[in-house]
Image: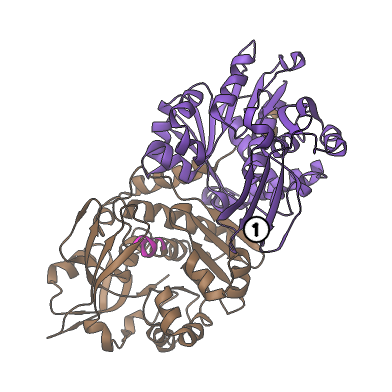
Chain colours: A brown, B purple
C-alpha cells in the first residue's frame, strides 16, 4: 500500500490573532506526510529543501514515519519560505512574503524505492511538476489524489486542467470549485469538474465541512464546531493527508470507504488548527483520533423516530 | 398539541436572478403556518392584514389548515409590504421597499380558542409584540420558539433581550448569533446566548446547514446541496415552521426529538427555495417530505468500518 506524497517542505512564518511564529517547518508535504503517518508508514515524500533545513527537522519527519529518501537537499540554496497574516476572524489571510528559492527549478526525482507507489498524493504545487511525478512513475498508481489552489487557476489554467484530467480525486475549496467550473452552485460545479476527469471531487468548506461528490452521489461531512481555531495553516493539507492515508491503510477505494476517509481527514484537520503549524500533529494518539472521529459521528447522529417507537 | 404562531402575514414583491414577482402573499407567519401545517392542524395564527388582503388568500390559508381566527383584518388600511432584490449568487439581498402599514400599531389579540396553546412560535416581529403574546396567554406554553433578526439587535437590543429571556428555543442565523453574543466562535456564542435564557439555540447557516445547541451538546444538520436555489425568501420561516410543527405533532421536546425536528425543518426549507414565495409549500405530499428527509439522512450516513468487517 505504498503511499507517495509530493508537495512543498518549507518554512512558514505565521501571524494569527493569538500570536506569531518565527520560521517554522511547514509546507503541504509536511502536513500531508505527518497526517498520513497516523494511518500508514512510511509515507514516501518527494520534495526539495535548501541547506537551511536542519538535520533535526529531517529527523523529526523520519521519526514520524516520513521517508525522506525523495527529499532533495540543495546545497547553497534556501528552502521555500512563506509568511502570512490572518484576519481577526481567521477567514482570510494576507501573504506577506513568498520566496520560491529551491522551488523555482524543482525537478521531482522519484527514488527507485518509491516505484511501488499504489497511492499518490499530489500536494499543492505547480501543475506541471505534479504531472511530472505521475509520468515518472513506471506504473500508474491505483489512486491519485490531487490538491491545488486558485493561484494555478489564475496563472496556469490550461496546464492545471491537463493535470486534473489525469487524477482520480480532486480536493479543492468551495471558492476554487466555483472558479474552476465557472458556476456558483456547487452541485453544478461538481458535475462540470467531474467531466474534466476526476471521478471524485472533494469540496472543502472550512468551518462548514466538506462535500464528497461521485457521479450523482454526494456525501456531506460536517466540520466539528470548535470553540477556538488557533491557526488554520495546513488544515487542508492535513485533511488530504488523513484522507489518502486512510485509503492507503485500508486499501479500499469504494465510495463508502471514501466517506470514512473524509471523516478521518476532517478529524485530523480539526486537531491541526488547535495549535500553531504542525505542533498538534506531532504527538497524537490513536485513542485521541478515534475519540475525535466518534465526535464527528455523534455530531450528525439522529435516532430515527421509528427506532424509538420500536424500542 | 395546539400550536399558535405569531408573525407577519404580508405582501412581498421579489426579484431574483431567475425572475420577479408582483405582490404575492408572504410574511413569516404565512411560511411558518404553511410549513407547520404538514405536521399538525390547525395552526392557529395571530397576525394582522389590511383590507387589501383578498378573501381568496385567507381561504388558501384555511384550506391548508391554518386557523385564521386570530388574523385581524383592518378595514381602510393596507397590509405590510416588503420588496427585495437578491444578488446574483442569492447570498445577499437589498430591501427596495418596506411599508409597515397595519404593522405600525399591531395589537396582537389572542382568541379564546387559542388559549389551549401548548406550542408557541414567535415569528420575526417587534420583540415587544412577541412578548405581549406570551403575556396574554393564560398558561405558559410547554415550548416557546422564537425567531428574530439582526434589525432588532440594531434598534431594540434591550427589548429583544427581555423577550429572549422568556423563550425556550431561539432560532437565528450565524451572523445574528455573532452580533447578539459579540463573539465570532459559534460555540462560544452559543454559550453566551444560552446564558441569556433560551435552553436551546438553533444557528441557521443557510447553504451550510444548521446547528442545534443545548448545554454542552451540539447537533449539526447539513443542508442538502441543491443544484439551484430559485428564491430563498421564507426559507428560515419555513424551517422554523417545520421545526415546531414536528415537535407539536410528536409532543416530545427531548434533545433527540429536536434533532429530528431540525432535519424535518431543513427538509421543508429545501422545498421552499425551489420556487417563488410559498408556491412549493402549497401542494407537497407526505411521500415527498419523507423522501426528502431520507435524502438528509443519506447525505451524512457512514457505514462504520467495524460493521463492514463484521458483515
Above or below, comparing residue A289 to residue A125 in the picture: above
User: Measured from the top left, where is residue A41 in percent x and y?
Assistant: 33, 65
User: Measured from the top left, where is residue B108 in percent x and y?
Assistant: 67, 22
Q: Specify the quadrant of the image occupied by residue A219.
A: bottom right
User: Measured from the top left, where is residue B281 in percent x and y?
Assistant: 77, 44
Subunit bearing disc 1: B
Residue B22 within the segment the image draws in magenta = no
Above or below, comparing residue B246 to residue B117 in the picture: below
Residue pictured at 59% horizontal, 26% vertical: B130
Q: Does residue A157 appear to the left or right of A28 in the view shown?
A: right
Q: Does residue B208 appear to the left or right of B59 in the view shown?
A: left
In this view of the protein, which residue sits in the foreground, B222 or A132? B222
- Magenta residues, start to end: A234-239
Residue A236 within the segment the image draws in magenta = yes
Above or below, comparing residue A161 to residue A258 in the picture: below
Residue pictured at 46% horizontal, 50% vertical: A223
Toward the top, the furthest residue is B138
Residue A200 in view in this figure: yes
Above or below, comparing residue A42 to residue B53 in the picture: below
Circle count: 1
Residue under numbered circle 1: B226
Q: Specify the quadrant of the image occupied by residue B74.
A: top right
The quarter of the picture where the N terminus of chain B appears is top right
In this view of the protein, which residue sits in the foreground, A254 or B299? B299
Q: Specify the quadrant of the image occupied by residue A240.
A: bottom left
Residue B233 in view in this figure: no
Amino acid at each position: 500500500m505504498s503511499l507517495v506524497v509530493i508537495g512543498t517542505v518549507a518554512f512558514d512564518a505565521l501571524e494569527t490573532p493569538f500570536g506569531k511564529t518565527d520560521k517554522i517547518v511547514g509546507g503541504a508535504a509536511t502536513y500531508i506526510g505527518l497526517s498520513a503517518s497516523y494511518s500508514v508508514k512510511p509515507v514516501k515524500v518527494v520534495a526539495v529543501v535548501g541547506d537551511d533545513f536542519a538535520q533535526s527537522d529531517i529527523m523529526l519527519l523520519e521519526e514520524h514515519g516520513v521517508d525522506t529518501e525523495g527529499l532533495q537537499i540543495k546545497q547553497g540554496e534556501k528552502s521555500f519560505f512563506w509568511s502570512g497574516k490572518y484576519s481577526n476572524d481567521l477567514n482570510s489571510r494576507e501573504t506577506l512574503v513568498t520566496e520560491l528559492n529551491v522551488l523555482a527549478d524543482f525537478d521531482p526525482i522519484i527514488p527507485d524505492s518509491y516505484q511501488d507507489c499504489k497511492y499518490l498524493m499530489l500536494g499543492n504545487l505547480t501543475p506541471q511538476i505534479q504531472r511530472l511525478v505521475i509520468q515518472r512513475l513506471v506504473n500508474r498508481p491505483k489512486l491519485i489524489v490531487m490538491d491545488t489552489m486558485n493561484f494555478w487557476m489564475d496563472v496556469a489554467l490550461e496546464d492545471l486542467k491537463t493535470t486534473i484530467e489525469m487524477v482520480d480525486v480532486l480536493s479543492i475549496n468551495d471558492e476554487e470549485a466555483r472558479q474552476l467550473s465557472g458556476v456558483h452552485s456547487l452541485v453544478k460545479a461538481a458535475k462540470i469538474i467531474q467531466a474534466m476527469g476526476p471521478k471524485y471531487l472533494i469540496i472543502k468548506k472550512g468551518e462548514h465541512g466538506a462535500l464528497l461528490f461521485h457521479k450523482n452521489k454526494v456525501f456531506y461531512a460536517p466540520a466539528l464546531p470548535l470553540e477556538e481555531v488557533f491557526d488554520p495553516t495546513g488544515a487542508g493539507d492535513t485533511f488530504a493527508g488523513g484522507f489518502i492515508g486512510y485509503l492507503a491503510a485500508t486499501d479500499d477505494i469504494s465510495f463508502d470507504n471514501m466517506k470514512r476517509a473524509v471523516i478521518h481527514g476532517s478529524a485530523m484537520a480539526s486537531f491541526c488548527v488547535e495549535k500553531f503549524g504542525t505542533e498538534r500533529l506531532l504527538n497524537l494518539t490513536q485513542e485521541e483520533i478515534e475519540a475525535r472521529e466518534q465526535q464527528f459521528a455523534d455530531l450528525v447522529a439522529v435516532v430515527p423516530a421509528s427506532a424509538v417507537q420500536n424500542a
